[in-house]
Image (cartoon, coloured by chain):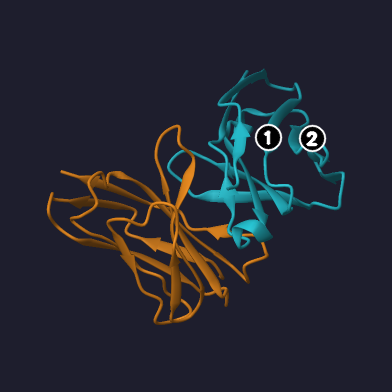
């Protein structure tokens, strides 16, 4: 089945460690996005990519990094520079930048 | 920049209609979306409307758009307990590079 897959579903990180969240899609979508969700704050855009080998910072990019080496994959690295990384992370993709976005099931990251 | 506002909570009785409201500020909004999020899951696209439309109906869902007032609503007829979730309004526009911008979400609670 076509879709967008995030892994893992739950992730625990020690303070000071980098951690990478996976996002893969087989929908042949050009655009991919990472959002962070905190209780009562809705979704905030971290990074987005509209084409392979290109990506742009969103509203809260500090402490995060991404890569887009393949059309299907858009991994997000949460670095030790992110001061408050505990959150629910959502990846999305769309056929192009002017069509509806489809979401993965999310990764809940907890710093311990 | 773009801004999308929603009330945070709505409580209804099973069988009644629910109306979830949303306002947005970007007059160049092209697409407006409604997403549903169940606990611990990603966002599911429910419906969307183009800015040149006033209304869209899809089974129990009716979307109304008042472009002059920049007001969007989602009506759910015959609300069921399975409709309990968080509902997100989102918009995309040329001013925002067509990146979806989300409201904070409305928690719909359906009482038996």
Would you call the spot at circle 2 few (<14 residues within 10 Å), some (14-19), or many (20 or more)? few
Question: Does residue B109 appear left or right of residue A75 in this picture?
Answer: right
Where's residue A93, x and y in %?
A: 54, 65
Q: Nearer the viewer's eye, disc 2 or disc 1? A: 2
Image quarter hosting the N terminus of chain A: bottom right
Which residue lies at the image location 25% right of the left edge and 52% below the top edge? A11
Quadrant hosting residue B54: top right
Q: Quadrant of residue A21?
A: bottom left
A64 versus A66 height, above or below: above
Q: Residues within 10 Å of mark 1 (few under 14, many from 20)?
A: many
Q: Are marks 2 and 1 in contact (CB under 8 Å)?
A: no
Chain of the residue on which disc 1 is drawn: B
Mark 2 vs mark 1, CA separation in Å: 11 Å
Pinpoint residue A6: horizontal percent, then vertical percent. Answer: 40, 61
Q: Secondary structure at mark 2?
A: loop
Disc 1, SS: strand
Residue at 52% x, 75% y is A26
Q: Which mark is residue B22?
A: 1
Q: Colour of chain A?
A: orange
**Does label 1 lie on the same chain as label 2?**
yes
Q: Earlier in the sequence, mark 2 or mark 1?
A: 1
- Disc number at residue B69? 2
Q: Is A110 placed left or right of A101 in the picture?
A: left
What residue is shown at x 20% (from left), y 55% (from top)?
A81
Up-down relation of residue A6 to residue A89 (above or below): below
In the picture, one chain is cyan; tell me its letter.
B
Residue A71: percent from left, percent from top: 48, 80
Decide: is A77 above or below B20: below
């Amino acid at each position: 089945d076509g879709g967008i897959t995030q892994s893992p579903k739950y992730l625990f990180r020690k303070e000071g460690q980098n951690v990478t969240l996976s996002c893969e899609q087989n929908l042949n979508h050009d655009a991919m996005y990472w959002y962070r969700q905190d209780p009562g704050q809705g979704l905030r855009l971290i990074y987005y990519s509209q084409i392979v080998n290109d990506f742009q910072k969103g509203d809260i990019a500090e402490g995060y990094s991404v890569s887009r080496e393949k059309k299907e994959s858009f991994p997000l690295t949460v670095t030790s520079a992110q001061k408050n990384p505990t959150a629910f992370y959502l990846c999305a993709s769309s056929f192009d930048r002017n069509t509806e976005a489809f979401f993965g099931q999310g990764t809940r990251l907890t710093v311990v | 920049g773009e801004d999308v506002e929603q009330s945070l909570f709505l409580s209804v009785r099973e069988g009644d209609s629910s109306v979830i409201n949303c306002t947005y500020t970007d007059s160049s909004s092209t697409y407006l979306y409604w997403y549903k999020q169940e606990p611990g899951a990603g966002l599911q696209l429910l419906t969307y409307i183009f800015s040149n439309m006033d209304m869209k109906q899809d089974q129990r869902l009716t979307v109304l758009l008042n472009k002059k007032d920049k007001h969007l609503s989602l009506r759910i007829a015959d609300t069921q307990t399975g409709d309990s979730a968080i509902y997100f309004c989102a918009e995309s526009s040329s001013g925002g590079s067509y990146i979806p911008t989300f409201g904070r979400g409305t928690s719909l609670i359906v009482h038996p």
